[in-house]
Image (cartoon, rainbow, N blue to C red):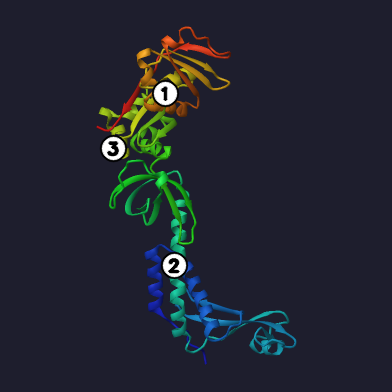
Amino acid sequence: MKKKANKEPSFLEALTGLGEERGIAPDILFDAIEMALISAYKKNFNSAPNVRVLLDRKTGAYHVYAIKTVVEEVENPIMEISIDAARVINADYDLDDIVEIEVTPANFGRIAAQTAKQVVMQRVREAERENVFEAYTNREGDIVTGLIQRIEGRNVFMEIGNTEAILAQSEQIAGEEYTSGKRMKVYIIEVKRANKGPQIAVSRTHPGLLKKLFELEVPEIEEGIVEIKSVAREPGMRSKIAVYSEQEEVDAVGSCVGQKGVRVQAIVDELGTEKIDIVKWNKDSATYIANALSPAKVVSVAVNEEEKVSRVVVPDYQLSLAIGKEGQNARLAAKLTGWKIDIKCESEAENEVLDEGMDEYIVTSEDSFTAESE
């Protein structure tokens, strides 16, 4: 008499719906069920390791098979079957062949369902975590909008998409207000696996955040017409960004500013009180250094190309502006250009002899723009 397959259509429908809801491939869930059924069988009926469970992907019917090796003389009946017994099943069996014998218990369904639920949900959680990891692992260096959920100690936890990210204190802008329910853009700095799922670290201080904000707001950057050459940032205080276009008719600085400053103002609004200097990059080192010291005006720049050292001369009345509060403007210009910059006023430099290897150039700063909160 042919044995009827055990069918559980409602379970199959629930499994399919669960996969669709959580975005998990059906095969992952079917594999989890089969593992659960093996676990249930070993726990309740037979602890032998030689068991295989087959779950029909279309009907939901399940079958448990004991796997045995064909031998001349059986020493371990759990793992072996005699060649005579094997040939009763199929005359083609020979020594060392593998025989699968169905051993599905009559009341296996109820026990299997109880055991399977916990295992399946665990696999579902693991698959969800893997899906999240795969979705974000290639997004390091990208910008996302996060919703602040809670604050624990000095860490801010944000919801991004269908997962959670952590904004550590070291990545927070000093003085910026973080409150539950507030939305803000953050920069993904790291995605890694952890025991409780993917751990996504984000930043509000990374220079990449500023760069990505400009890419979002300025179509010419996204299209490759305008290029961001360098970014220097002291978060919450002041930033400098150097831009350039190979197309002479394109105003790289103006493109970033936008009509009536609307483009850069959107970025300033996102970053709060941070001032942003947009300067023009130039392949000529002396001109580029002069531009980087914006908004200060420069008289001359002496450079040593080999050692990346420069001496900049500014009008006496521009010295404090060139250096900036607590040296900030000069410090950011040095970061932006990658040059060491020594700033002198005209009266100081008048009788000073240039160091060996330095060439001095009279330069005029090119157009720049400084944006700050209104």
In the rendered view, would you say 48 is above or below 303?
A: below
In the rendered view, would you say 214 is above or below 16?
A: above
**Which residue is situated farthest in the bottom direction here?**
1
Query: As shown in the figure, which amino acid type bears the numbered disc 3?
Result: Asp
Query: As shown in the figure, which amino acid type bears the numbered disc 1?
Result: Ala
Q: Earlier in the sequence, mark 3 or mark 1?
A: 3
Discs 2/1, front: 1
Answer yes or no: do the residues labelled 3 and 2 have beta carbons within 8 Å? no
Q: Specify the quadrant of the image occupied by residue 124.
A: bottom left
Give the percent coordinates (x, y) of residue 225.
40, 30
Is 88 in front, or is 352?
Answer: 352
- Give the residue pinned by disc 2: 124
Give the percent coordinates (x, y) of residue 204.
38, 42
Marks 3 and 2 sit apart, C-alpha to C-alpha, by 41 Å
- Give the residue pinned by disc 3: 269
Discs 3/2, front: 3
Q: Which mark is residue 32?
A: none
Query: As shown in the figure, which amino acid type bears the numbered disc 2?
Result: Val
Is 245 in front, or is 280?
Answer: 280
Answer yes or no: do the residues labelled 2 and 1 have beta carbons within 8 Å? no
Rate crowding at label 3 as few (under 14), some (14 to 19) or many (20 or more) other CA atoms within 10 Å: few
Q: Secondary structure at mark 3?
A: helix
Q: Which mark is residue 292?
A: 1
Marks 2 and 1 sit apart, C-alpha to C-alpha, by 53 Å
Rate crowding at label 1 as few (under 14), some (14 to 19) or many (20 or more) other CA atoms within 10 Å: many
Q: Secondary structure at mark 1?
A: helix
In the rendered view, would you say 129 is above or below 31?
A: above
Q: Quadrant of the C terminus?
A: top left
Residue 223, can we see it?
no
Q: Earlier in the sequence, mark 3 or mark 2?
A: 2
